[in-house]
Image (cartoon, rainbow, N blue to C red):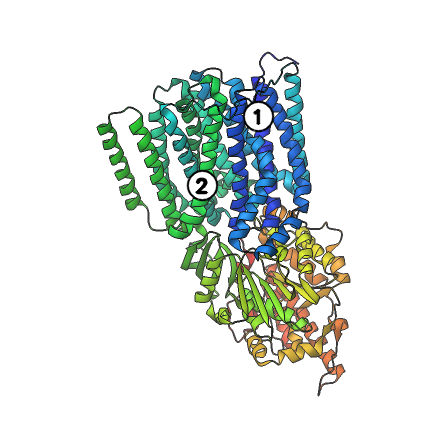
Amino acid sequence: MRIKNVKPLIMILFLLSGFVSLIFQVVWLKTLVLVFGNTVWAVSTLLTAFMAGLALGSWLFGKIADKVGSPLKLYGIIEGLIGFTALITLPLFDNLIYIYRPLYSLTGGDNVAMGVIKFLIAFLVLIIPTSLMGGTLPLLAKRFANNLKTAGSTIGYLYTINTLGAVLGTFISGFFLIPALGLKLTLLCASGANFIILIVILMITMKDKIRLSLKNLFKSKTSLTKNKYILWIFFLCGFAALGYEVLWNRILVLSIGSSVYAYTVMLAVYLLGIAIGAAMMSYFIPRLKKPEVALTIIQFLIAASVIFQIKRFGTLSTTITNLGNVIGITNHASYIASLFLATTQIILIPTLLFGATFPLVVKIFVNDIKKIGSETGVLYSFNTLGTILGSFTAGFLLLPVIGVQKSLVCLALLNLLIGSYVFIRSGVKKQLAIGIIISIISLFIVGYNSLCNKDEVILKAGIFQNSQRGKVEILSFSEDIYATVTVEERTEVSGTWRSLSMNGINVAGTACELFTIQKMQGHLPLLLHKNPKSVLHIGFGSGGTAWAVSRYPVEKIVIAEISRSIIEKSSKYFTSVNHNVLSDPRLDIRFTDGRNLILGTREKFDVILSDSVHPRFSGNGSLYTYDYYKLLRERLNPGGLISQWLPFYSVTPENFKMIVRAFHEVFPHTSIWYINSTVNPYVIIIGKTDSNRIDFEKMAARMRIKEVREDLEEIDIDNPFKVLDYFLFTDEKVKAFTDDVPLHTDDNMAVEYLSGKEVNRRLTVITNYYELIKHRISIEPYLINIRDKGTSEGNIRDRIQLYETGTGYNLNGQLMFLLGKREKAFKEFELIRFYNPEDLEPVEFFGASFQRPFLTQAALSVN
């Protein structure tokens, strides 16, 4: 098939190529972190392996492009090979665990050794498809860049089209494909698109012959003339661009949240700005007589935009609110639109300038039309290598050492130095150039010092500002490689409490609903297990749960915590909750991803507490899947027990049931517990493999242990009936509760996507709460050994029934309260004292010894 002008068609195909390449990157990253862990180290390792493949491919195929008879036909074949090798990654991923586990055991999980191993495994798995991806631009540059005058424009337009495809891939994969199809089917669809590109290209180039000559392939040298320096300039530009992306992501998460959609919006705006900037500069390139001066101006403007950004970040939450008022946030689409516009007004200008850099450096560097493929390839590979180093430096060196705001300034100074060097090389008189450079750098320093306050990108984030709900004071914050960790003191009408947050997400605190459940997350499983000796606690939080566990005569308590800052803040600001439990010699703290520890270790435990961050946030859904629960079961000793903290706010009813069903499929004896002493949106799920029976006598005996009794008395629990009264339902009722909803799996972590769209957070609390209490049954049939000294069996049964009756009014009252029917709620609460004066709960109504504030909104809100 012959087409007179194939360029428009090829542009469409290259758009599709960028589209599927981004999809592959997202799917591969999400799949590999399930094995390698969700730490920053693991994610950075995978991205490094991905980018290293692109750099290698652009360099290698750049050389090949100059020696092939039909670069277009070879491009089509490469696209087909990308699709084929992407399909091969599916069985590789499925069996990766069998390679990873022995290596984990061999190294003892050492972070440094495993970091190297993870990179090597990821590199070997991804090297072929990513190298093929890196080779597409040099081949098309060779095919369509016919003269030096227009080379910058032609290659710039190719880069623009491919990046626009990546923008579409970001949106469509994040908002539609992955939520609807799951990871594997999404990858299959992307591979199919590669095969379509192959077929179309082969039809176009049917009569073309590749005639590839590999002779002297690696001996030929790129024509590096006086402009060789531009390679290192473009390396530094890539370094700065990815450094900014890392820093922006850390700042933006405090205002736009940590959902998969928030990250998708940020990445899409970033790529869109680059694409538009490249297109604009590609248009003007033929008219530029001094591209070096243009490159200088761009670098200076990037640096200047940093000051603007720092000021704008402080008002971002207000901007989102104002945009929401104008747009009218009635659904998820309008909310995303407000995020998109708010993010755009901050990062669009610098990303436009990033994109404009590429055509300029091509214009400056490319000087031999016969070697345009190799010159484009080496240029692109240098930039890609710069992005790898920039991402690593920003995330692992700058952020934890000097903080995000000073890191932005350092990168801005780097842009000023890049621009200064290029300006001096541009042919302008050195004395004049130096004078201008000194003036601009001085102006930048004076502008920053006079306009920007210390750490204002963090301190002025909307979640840390006072609002109608009350006053917020940041007591402390730190920026480690994993997250921005803050301790806030929040004063509301009902009282004052402390909150511990990661990237603006509350993970623990002293509010009534948090304080109580943190303790019960530790006490409940230890009371239900027959004879617990070893405990694994995933997610330290404020340490209240670990302290509760330490009250029992266990021999070993392993803590899996991903952030060192969490431990540091907890030991300093939450001693009233954790009682300095970190000094307990039985504690073994391991700074790692909890799921990765479970996957890699050979240790087994009697009790595992999975106390994770909310499942709707990006990356956390993997700690609530059927596959994860199977891993947990493998790490249990016979008769072992799993305890899972599960929120029901901002989770759709279907998603909530999907998680419960996934849990129940692995643990046939599953029970649901609601800590009804306070109005709260959480449940604790207990999973057992042997029996759903509860030994009343053993539970009562453990509660008589001095340390256990004293700790439980802090939350007004002075007898086993109050603990048993938290029971909602088990076994057959769990099956009825989950209906026929699908499993929540690693392949389709629907909670991150479907619940991530939920706008009406309060409605989810009401709906899920109603469904839970509707299935409530009596615990009495599941008890054994209910005789004790001095008390008849009948009296125990009578007291259980008395508690259950009183709690019925409590639960109904809480429902009325959630519905806003306060008078009806108070009438229900008042009835409790007449049926069971021993159990005057909820504490918000009757008061308690620990005097926590009336229900705070923290439990019903999420960023």
Q: On the rendered structure, is 162 left or right of 775?
A: left
Question: Residue 774's quadrant in the figure?
Answer: bottom right
User: Secondary structure under badge 2?
Assistant: helix
- Residue 383 drawn at (x, y percent): 45, 33
Q: Earlier in the sequence, mark 1 or mark 2?
A: 1
User: How busy is the neighbourhood of tag 1: few (under 14 within 10 Å), some, or many (20 plus)?
Assistant: many
Look at the picture and state if 407 lies above or below 212.
below
Look at the picture and state if 471 lies above or below 699.
above
Q: On the rendered structure, is 658 left or right of 391?
A: right
Farthest bottom residue in view: 790
Q: Is residue 276 visible?
A: no
- Residue 292 drawn at (x, y percent): 35, 25
Q: Nearer the viewer, residue 216 or 119?
A: 216
- Residue 475 drawn at (x, y percent): 40, 61
How many numbered badges does the structure rendering display? 2
Identified by mark 1, the residue type is Phe
Q: Look at 60% across and 55% down and name the residue there.
A: 106
Q: Nearer the viewer, residue 603 or 434?
A: 603
Identified by mark 2, the residue type is Leu
Tell me how far mark 1 sits from mark 2, CA to CA. Answer: 27 Å
Q: Which mark is residue 389?
A: 2
Look at the picture and state if 157 lies above or below 792.
above
User: Secondary structure under badge 1?
Assistant: helix
Question: Residue 93's quadrant in the figure?
Answer: top right
Q: Which residue is mark 1?
A: 14
Look at the picture and state if 110 lies above or below 691.
above
Q: Look at 65% across and 71% down and name the residue there.
A: 532
Q: On the rendered structure, is 75 left or right of 357?
A: right
Picture quarter with the N terminus: top right
Q: Look at 60% across and 52% down and name the residue there.
A: 103
User: How busy is the neighbourhood of tag 2: few (under 14 within 10 Å), some, or many (20 plus)?
Assistant: some
- Residue 665 drawn at (x, y percent): 74, 56
